[in-house]
Amino acid sequence: MDERLTLEKIGELAGVSRATVSRVVNSQPNVRPEVRERVLAVIAETGYQPHLAARSLASNRTGLIGLVIPRILQSLFTDPYYPRLLQGVTQVCNEHAVILTLFMFHSEDEETRLYPRVLRPGTLDGVVVVSSQEEDPLIARLAESGLPFIVIGRPTDATAVSYVDVDNVTGAETAVSHLINLGRQRIATITGRQDMSAGLDRLEGYRRALLASGRAIDEALIAAGEFEEGQAYEAMLRLLPQQPDAVFVASDAMALGALNALHSAGLEVPGDVAVVGYDDLPAAAIASPPLTTVRQPIRRFGALAVETLLNIIETGSEPPRHILLPTELIIRETCGGS
Amino acid sequence: MDERLTLEKIGELAGVSRATVSRVVNSQPNVRPEVRERVLAVIAETGYQPHLAARSLASNRTGLIGLVIPRILQSLFTDPYYPRLLQGVTQVCNEHAVILTLFMFHSEDEETRLYPRVLRPGTLDGVVVVSSQEEDPLIARLAESGLPFIVIGRPTDATAVSYVDVDNVTGAETAVSHLINLGRQRIATITGRQDMSAGLDRLEGYRRALLASGRAIDEALIAAGEFEEGQAYEAMLRLLPQQPDAVFVASDAMALGALNALHSAGLEVPGDVAVVGYDDLPAAAIASPPLTTVRQPIRRFGALAVETLLNIIETGSEPPRHILLPTELIIRETCGGS
DNA sequence: GCGCATTATGAGAGCGCTCTCAAATAGTGG
DNA sequence: CCACTATTTGAGAGCGCTCTCATAATGCGC
C-alpha cells in the first residue's frame, strides 16, 4: 500500500500487462470490455493516477499551458480585468483537464531572464500571451520556436499570429455614434496609448463614427491620455478651450479623471459635456454621475483564448486564428438622453 | 541545428560525457574548471535548456508549485486581494526559478473532480492553498498525501499544518483600541463569517480591546455581517437602536454598507458614529468620508507563503511553520480625531 | 619516482510512461 | 473444420535526465 503506484503495478493487480493498462487509461480501443472493466476497477480501488512527468517524457505532451502576463500590464492588475480573465481561462483549463501555469514578470530584467523558461523544452504544450505594448519580443520568439501560442489582444504584426481580441474599433464606433445620435456636435476624444492596439483601435472607431455621419475629423479635439487617470485629467483640461459638448474617453480609469477635470472646471455632466468611457469597471457604475461605457466580455475572452489554443495544439497553427469579440454599450447617465 | 538538444548532444559537442554535462548544468563539484568552462560555452552557444519532463522523471522534482484558490473565495476576486497576492507569489517563484501553476475552481463539482489532480504524482513539488471556509477537504488530503503544502489564512485545525496568516486578532484589537482612545463609549461591531478564521479573529480582537480597557462585552452591540455589503447594511440598521457611537466593521466592503446605512438613517460619520473597516480596499480611500481601516500586507503575504513552502520542500515539514504578519492601522476620517 | 589518497570522468541502470511490432487469440467464410 | 483476417495482448525499446559506482587521471609525501 505504501509503495508507489505504477502502470506495472496496476497491471499486476489486474492480471494484465503494462501496455494494456496504458490503453485503458488513455481510452484507446482494442481492449476487451471485460478486461477494461477489470482494469478500471483496480484503478478506482487504488486511486491510481499516471505519473505526469513520465507521461510527458514519453509522449512529448505535458498537459500544461502557460499564461504570460508581461510587466507593462501589471498596473492594470488593480482593476478586475485579470481576475475575470483568469476565471475564463481557468474554467476552460478545468474542462479540458489542462493545468495552467502563470508567468508574471515584475521587471525588464526578469522578462529577459525568464522568457527562455517559457520556451523550455518539456514544459508547456502551448502559451497564452497577454499582449502589452506592441512588439513583445516573446511573440517573435514563440513564433520562431514553433510552440503553439495565442495572443490576447491583437499584436501589431497580426496576420501571421493567432489572436483573440475585442472588437475595439466597432466598440468605440458604437459609443461615438451614440453620442452623435444624441445630438452632440463637438465630440472630443481622449486616447489611450498609441503603441497598443486597444489605443489605436478605439481612436480608429472614433474616427469612423464621425466620418460615417459625414463629419470631419478635428485633430484639436483629440487629446492623448496614455490610459492613465492623471494624464486624462490634464488632457480634458487641454480640450476645454475647444468647447467640446461630448468626450469619448478610451478607458474608464481615464474617464474618471476626465470627470474630475470637468467638475473642477465647473462644467455639468452630461448637461454641458457628455462623457463615455470604455471597460465598464466597477467604479464606472458608482461614479457620479454613473458612467456610460463600453463593456468587454472579458471572461469569454479568456475562455476563448484557451479553447483556441487547445485547438491549435490539436490541429496545428495553420491558418492563424483571428477572433474578434463584440462589445456592449452600457448606457448610464454621463451621456445624457438614453 | 534542427535536431533537439539533449545532454548527450551537448556532451558530444564539448567532448565530454552526458554525466559531466549534467554535473555542469546542476553546478555540482568535481568538474575540472577548464572542462566546466568548455561545457558552459557550448550551452551558451546552443541555448540548451534541460528537458523539464525528463529531469522531473529522473529526479522526482518538477520545479512546479501549485496555488489553489477554492471556489468560495472567488467572490473576493473583484477586490485587489488576489492580484496583490499573485504579485507576491510570482515574485518569489521567479526568484527561485519555480514555475507557478494556478488552480481555480468554479463549482463544488469541479472541486471534487479536480482535487485529485492537484495531488497527481509527478506534477507538483508543493502547494499553496488559500484557505476558505474552515475544513477545506483538500487540506486533509494534502496532509495525508505527504506533499509539502502551506495554507494562506489559518485553518481551524492549525497546529499540525503550516500556515501564513495576518494577525487578525491584533489588527482588530488595535483598531478598536484606537476607537477607545478616541473616547468612544458604545463601540459596536459587525462581524465577518464565523466559519472563517478571519471572521473569528477579528471578533476576538474586538473583544480583547474592550476587555483590556476594562469594559464589558455587550452582545447586543455585536451583529453578523457575513462579509457581505448588503448584510452589513442590515446589520448596521439592527445596531442603531443600541445607539452605538462607533462601529468596528470586519471588512471594508461591509463598512461601505454600514456607511450607507448610517447615511440613510441620517447619522453623521464620524460625528455621531465612528466607523473603522478592515482590508484597505481602494474603495476605502475614496469613500465619503474616507474610511479608517486596517491594512494587510498582502503581497508580502503571498511572497512569504511561497518562501516558506520552498523551505518546507527543502527541509521537510517538521516542525509546522506558523507565521503571523502584522497589520497597519490606516487612519482616515471615519473614526474622527486622529 | 613509487605508492597512496583524491579528484575527475564515463558507463550503465533506471525513473514511469508511450508506442511499435510481433505473437496470440478470436472471429469469419467457404 | 480449415485457412485466413481482424482483434487483443505483451515484450521491448526509448523518451532525456539523474545518480551510483567503477575506472582513469591527478596530486602528494617521502
Image (cartoon, coloured by chain):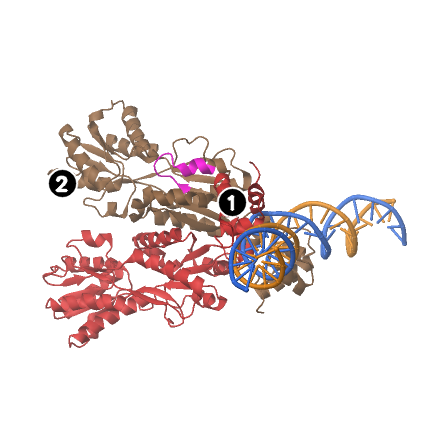
Chain colours: A red, B brown, C blue, D orange
Secondary structure beneath disc 1?
helix
Mark yes or no: residue A194 visible.
yes
Q: Position of residue B27 (x, y in %)?
A: 62, 52
The residue under label 2 is B263
Q: Position of residue B165 (x, y in %)?
A: 39, 37
Membership of B138 in magenta stretch: yes
Question: What is the three-letter code of the residue carrying label 1?
Answer: Val
- For the N terminus of chain B, the quadrant is bottom right
In the rendered image of this protein, does residue A7 appear above or below residue A289? above
Disc 1: CA contacts within 10 A as few (<14), some (14-19) or many (>=20):
many
Of residues B308 and A90, which is closer to you in this image?
A90
Determine which of the numbered discs, if any, sits on residue A244 in the image. Answer: none
Of residues A317 and B128, which is closer to you in this image?
A317
Q: Position of residue A299 (x, y in %)?
A: 31, 55
Write the residue at 24% across / 22% down: B216
Q: Say which quarter of the image contains residue B73.
A: top left
Membership of A240 in magenta stretch: no
Mark yes or no: residue B25 visible.
no
Q: Which residues are magenta?
A: B129-142
What chain is tagged by disc 2?
B
Check chain identity for marks 1 and 2: say if they share one.
no
> How many marks overall?
2
Q: Say which quarter of the image contains residue A85.
A: bottom left
Disc 2: CA contacts within 10 A as few (<14), some (14-19) or many (>=20):
few
The residue under label 1 is A39
Q: Are marks 1 and 2 in contact (CB under 8 Å)?
A: no
Q: Position of residue A97 (x, y in %)?
A: 42, 51
- For the C terminus of chain B, the quadrant is top left
Foreground: disc 1 or disc 2: 1
What chain is tagged by disc 1?
A
